[in-house]
Image (cartoon, rainbow, N blue to C red):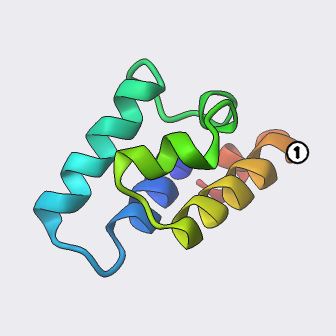
Amino acid sequence: DVYGCIIRSVVSQMISVKAASSISSRIEQMCNGKLIPKRIAGLSVEQLRVCGLSNSKCVTIHAVTDLFSKSRNLNEKIH
């Protein structure tokens, strides 16, 4: 899953593996176990911040989510 990989990459930049894993787990829990654009788009910056993300990572994740939401089959095109 290209989208999930990109989101996890943004989360893990410049933090420890353990911290990235914890933050990713919190985000996945808020998304009912699936990192998909529709579910991430439904999360506010504040909700993502509660998971442990910085403002800049929240903005980046929302930008990636917006791109994937607007571009049909982008996941398959990249893969």
In this view of the protein, which residue sits in the foreground, 4 or 77?
Answer: 4
Q: Residues within 10 Å of mark 1 (few under 14, many from 20)?
A: few
Q: Position of residue 46 (x, y in %)?
A: 56, 46
Q: Position of residue 79 (x, y in %)?
A: 58, 54
Q: Residue at x 69, y 49 (%)?
A: 65
Q: Is residue 74 above or below residue 57?
A: above
Kindly state the secondary structure of the residue where label 1 is placed: helix
In this view of the protein, which residue sits in the foreground, 58 or 75?
Answer: 58
Q: Residue at x 46, y 52 (%)?
A: 49
Q: Where is residue 68 in the image (x, y as percent from the top left)?
A: 75, 48
**Residue 1 can be seen, yes or no:** no
Does 31 sit left or right of 45 as displayed?
A: left
Q: Which residue is drawn at 86% across and 47% down?
A: 71
Does 42 sit left or right of 73 as displayed?
A: left
List the single residue furthest toward the top. Answer: 32
List the single residue furthest toward the left. Answer: 18
Q: How many marks?
A: 1
Q: Which residue is drawn at 60% across and 37% down?
A: 40
**Residue 49 can be seen, yes or no:** yes
Q: In this view, does 76 lie above or below 55?
A: above
Q: Position of residue 9 (x, y in %)?
A: 41, 65
Instruction: Please state which amino acid type lies under the numbered disc 1.
Output: Lys
Which residue is disc 1 drawn over? 70
List the single residue furthest toward the bottom. Answer: 14
Does 57 sit left or right of 11 as displayed?
A: right
